[in-house]
Amino acid sequence: MTKVLVCIEDGMLRIRINRILTDKRIPFDIVKTPIRKDDLTRYQFLIIHSSYKISGLYQFIESLLVNQTIPIIFISMNSMSSILHRFQNNPFFVQIDEVKMDGELPLAITLFQKQTLKLESLIEENKALKTKLNTEQAMSKCKKLLMSEGLSEEEAHQLILKTAMDFKISKFDACIKIINEFK
């Protein structure tokens, strides 16, 4: 579930953001005190208003964006004059004019939620592909080793599968076991 950290000092704007997030049923925390990068691990994205008083605010935001730490929605009175304008094309950054916030903030939240889901999906897909690649590389290495000992490719493959089933381990682990036994 999406959880948002809101960094803001402006009381009236805090009420508006509270209403928007509550209407969208998004859990959130609002802070006035300075935050650290470590605090951000519990959140899917960050909403920062220009009223948020922390020294080096723009450098802090820039650091988060450069390192792609967390997506940021930055709200200010005049979005086009901000120092952060150079990040307009950064996929981890959306800048919203405070006057248009009631319409744009829910849209930005929805887009970040979709982006987060897609990113998580791609990360899982990447892990699966890496696992498959590692298994295929181990299988190839193990088959070559077994074939150098006189087995056919099919016999080597069957031995790997039998080892995996006998020891109740993955094909990758079976290959590693066989390779280690030959060393």
Image: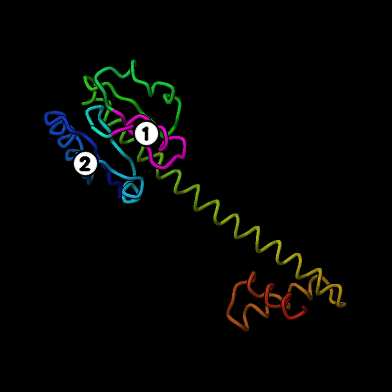
Please indicate whether residue 87 sits to the left or right of residue 163 in the image.
Answer: left
Which quadrant of the structure image shows residue 6?
A: top left
Residue at x 39%, y 21% (from the top left corner): 85
Image coordinates for residue 41, horizontal then vertical, percent: 35, 50
| Element class at badge 1 | helix
Instruction: Give the mark, 1 or 2, whose residue is nearer the N terminus.
Output: 2
Q: Residue at x 60, y 72 (%)?
A: 170
Which residue type carries mark 2? Thr
| Residue 58 drawn in magenta | yes
Residue that numbered label 1 is attached to: 61
Which of 83/29 is in front? 83
Dividing the picture into quadrants, the one containing residue 183 is bottom right
Q: Residue furthest bottom?
A: 166
Query: Where does the image place residue 158, in percent across and percent down from the top left?
Result: 73, 76
Horizontally, is 167 left or right of 51 in the view?
right
Q: Which numbered tag is attached to residue 27?
A: none
Segment tinted magenta in the rendering: 55-74
Residue 148 lies within the magenta run: no
Q: Is 79 above or below relative to 92? A: above
Residue named by callout 2: 33
Q: CA distance from mark 1 to mark 2?
A: 15 Å
The quadrant holding residue 4 is top left
* Residue for point 87% across, 77% down: 150
**Three-letter code, disc 1:** Ile
Expressed as whole percent of the image width and height from the top left, the position of residue 122 reads: 50, 47
